[in-house]
Image (tube, rainbow, N blue to C red):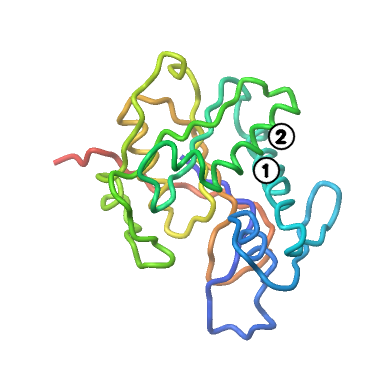
Amino acid sequence: MRVVSVCAYNTNTNRPREQVDFHCMKFVKAVKGKGFSKYAFIPTSVGLLKLEPSNADDALGWAAEKIGAEILQRCTPHRLGLVPVPGSKHTSSRQVGEGRLSTLLLRIQTWLQARHVTDVTVMPWLWWNQEMASASDEGGPREPMDLAPHLIVAPRAASSGDRKLLIIDDVVTTRGHLRASNAVLRSAGYDVGDFAFALARTVHDVASAFAVEETELEPFTWPLQS
């Protein structure tokens, strides 16, 4: 599986502040419904748009456009299922479906449908068997072997049998959550696509904050083989 991310932000705290590109970071905060200060400039299909707290919800549409365009470029647009990686506190399908990432996926669905990809749906079919510590805020687990045992997969339904599932995350760092999600969905018999997608990746140094990057996901199989 390959992972496609559409922007990047810097995690090197030793760099001088004036050398850090905050535009992607503020974009991600807006998409996730978190507050940010001042403004950022976001490249879109209609040019460079200014993002401010007053129009923060517009970021959802801009992000949907960016990820939707990458899906169209790489995937056969037929019977697609968009699967969000569950947030660390999501312990039911309902909680996943009400999460901000699922809101983004619904916007991606709408964007694709406007381009005649009509048979696409959002599937909140992964959740945790307990609340997990956040990897970014609470030092929670990042390794797929530590995450996979806690992921619950919705039972296969007849209507989902031949859908191609696309796993989507908001921010990837080690990619452990994507690897675990991919492994447990495949072990449950789902047809998972060759590509996963993410809004952003964290990097030590940023050459171009809004450059699309495609990287190979390190293989991981679940259950572990003895």
Residue at x-position 51% and y-position 46%: 99
Q: Residue at x 74, y 51 (%)?
A: 58
Q: Residue at x 26, y 53 (%)?
A: 146
Asked if labels 2 and 1 touch by Cβ distance under 8 angstroms, the answer is: yes
Placement of 217 over or under 41, stated as above or below: above
Residue 123, numbered label: none
Q: Earlier in the sequence, mark 1 or mark 2?
A: 1
* Rendered image: mark on residue 111: 2
| Relative horizontal placement of residue 215, taking residue 128 as reference (left or right) | right
Instruction: Determine which residue is flagged by label 1.
Output: 64
> Viewer-proximal residue, 136 or 18?
136
Residue lying at the far left in this picture: please name it: 226
Residue 200, compared with residue 191, is above or below; it is: below
**Residue projecting furthest to the right:** 46
Answer left or right for 150 relative to 57: left
**Residue type of the residue flagged with mark 1:** Ala
| Front residue of this view, candidates 95 and 179 | 95
Q: Position of residue 65 (x, y in %)?
A: 72, 42
